Image (cartoon, rainbow, N blue to C red):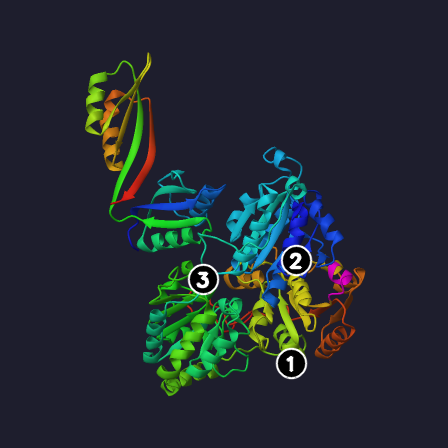
Amino acid sequence: MEEAARRVISVIVINEASVLSRITDLFSGRGYNITSLTVAPIPESRYSRLTIVTSGSVRVMEQITKQLHKLIPVLKVIEHADLVEKEMALVKFPITENLSDISALCSAYNGNIVNVSEEVIIAMVADEPKRVDYFLAAVKRFHPKEIVRSGAVALER
Amino acid sequence: MQISGAQMVIEALIAENVDTIFGYPGGAIMNVYDEIYKQNSFKHILARHEQAAVHAAEGYAKASGKVGVAMITSGPGFTNAVTGLADAYMDSVPMVVISGQVPMSLIGTDAFQEIDAVGISRSCTKHNYLVTDAADLARILKEAFYIARTGRPGPVHVDIPKDVTAQIATFDYSKPVELETYKPNVNGNLRQIKKAMEAIAEAKRPLFYLGGGIINANAGEEIRKLVQMTGIPAVETLMARGTLRFDDPLLISMLGMHGSYAANMAMSETDLVIGLGARFDDRVTGKLSEFAKNAKVIHVDIDPASISKLVNADFPIVGDLKNVATSMIEIAKTTVDKERYTPWLETVANFNRLHPLSYKEDTVELKPQWVIQRVGELLGDDANISTDVGQHQMWTAQFYPFSRPRQWITSGGLGTMGFGFPAAMGVKVADPSRVSINFTGDGSILMNVQELMTTVEYKLPVINIILNNNYLGMVRQWQTLFYNKRHSSTDLSVQPDFVKLAEAFGGIGYRVSTKEEFDAALKDAVEKNVVAFIDVKVHRLENVMPMVPSGGSLFNMMLEYKEK
């Protein structure tokens, strides 16, 4: 058997009711993985763009692409080979942690502190998903209270 | 034109030239039923269960090639219909199913008879719609019919809330369908077709692998011509029966789990599989890694997702089979030399001589295979043949002499017991001049037996031939072979009196256990032209053979099983 590798696909769909469930039902019904999924309308159009991070062999990916194409509201499926990929993460720290250390770490990962309240510090980074992993590993020592990742978005180079 | 949503449904059905719909009314769909009452353009047949209404629409669609239409209410009406939708989806049956829904204001409140119908049907339809504005109805219904019949056909479900059927809006059905995201490729890449034809010309042991897509594409005539002019032998899937005439010397038989020895051996020995509208289903291929191991594969299908899904295609061709076959015929005229395959035909003939499809006659009890062959002798081409699911279905596929596409109506992909009787009813509506036979089992027939009432009421004389072995025979066979004869919940010794049952509904019943009795009963039922049950006592422990055990290699067939 061929290795299941991480893949990123973008799907352009007509922005109509239940189109997202059509896609997610297809993945769950046919036993495909979704690692992350983001969706938002494409400005000034009747379409939405989904970015799906999944994993599978070449054969499985071919099936996923074809099955997606079969859905009536799907306009285009792009299997990315050469892509720019970014993901955002927000992390909440206790106010007792060192603000400037966190800030310095954030700037190394294309991020910054976005909110400081009486109780917490919230930091944001936007970088390649792999680098977001590194960032999240690095900030462990600041005792993060809550972490949220956006899922990846991608554009073909 | 300013009309109500309910009137729009009627107008759309008329515009689509629908002559018959099958359905069952209820609260949420009442506005539409009120309009059905007022019109005379098409006939409504009241089934006695929503599942049967949908199977009847399937039978109608399969026999006629037209889009079948069923209508049901919300909640349980819809959930009862789901099996029919799933069945049609698996077998690519063109169908539009219209369901009522609770009013828009009540959606999401767990209202009476509310269920998320489009949520349920999403995974078992080609497409579905929840109509939220009557102004969209003309477009949606037109799209529904278009999507159902084009590309790889399939069922489309349209869910209409009750207030939308009451809403008045503009109706214009003349606008052509514009679907930017749905454009099936019908022509097939000519360069790919040429390459495939070169492979055929170079092959030594090519084999046509004919599937149900041929029937859907109405390409039977072209395929017969292609097979005949190339002189290449052919095997058929369950869904393709009738593509070639039963007596065509190039037709080997059905292949797969209960395929003939020759068909399965030919598939194992071929050096070029020419797959036409078939989808390499697990019941056909057996163990995938051993399937047609030394062969290149040509795969023609209208659905790109079917190609290289299970078996890698060396020559993938996406297109409508009628068009592709026409191109193939044109090219074959100059490239294919029939003589080339003579040694291969000899090999195939040897397989046939070695283990022909057969069964052993019994001096005391009727054999189910005999009954099927006998109906073939007596009615042949004059009958359309539906079946339920199980042993009787496989025997019918093996032993009935099919002579044309659309003669054979069965539930293949989903394997739905209870399909046969309502489907045979739909077949009778579509093709009234022919006898409509339903071969069934004593298990299957009880799963939609209430259709006795519908067929009697509408004078749709379906002849149900119950091959009665007092068992859920196919499961019993597996238990015998693979579960050490532990016949768990498959003994159907306790049975209704099928003769009285038919009579109770106003049909006619026969109980037969000899050849003479059977002949007399069938003759009488055909002559009287009434709804009939022929309860045929057959050998209890007959097995369907050959058999490729599930997951086994196609060439490892069990040819017979001796009861110890």
| Residue B391 vs residue B407, the one in the foreground | B407
Residue reaching furthest top?
Answer: A118
- Give coordinates of residue A9: x percent, y percent: 33, 46
Residue appearing at x 57%, y 45% in the figure: B136
In the rendered structure, which amino acid carries the disc numbered 3? Asp
Q: Earlier in the sequence, mark 2 or mark 1?
A: 2
Per the rendering, the mark at residue B282 is 3
Q: Earlier in the sequence, mark 3 or mark 2?
A: 2
Tag 2 secondary structure: helix
Q: Earlier in the sequence, mark 3 or mark 1?
A: 3
Q: Is residue B527 above or below residue B551?
A: below
Return the residue at label 2: B14
Residue reaching furthest front?
Answer: B1
Q: Is residue A94 above or below residue B150?
A: above
Return the residue at label 1: B377
Tag 1 secondary structure: helix
Give me the C-alpha separation between circle 3 and circle 2. 41 Å
Image position of B59 (left or right of A138): right
Image position of A152 (left or right of B80): left
- Whether residue B555 is visible here, answered yes or no, is no
Tags 2 and 1 touching, CB below 8 Å:
no
- Give coordinates of residue A112: x percent, y percent: 25, 24
- Give coordinates of residue B546: x percent, y percent: 50, 72
Name the image quarter holding residue B405: bottom right
Q: Chain of mark 2?
A: B
Per the rendering, the mark at residue B25 is none
Magenta region, residue range: B454-460
Residue appearing at x 34%, y 33% in the figure: A150
Disc 3 crowd rating (10 Å Cα; few below 14, some 14-19, many 20+) is some
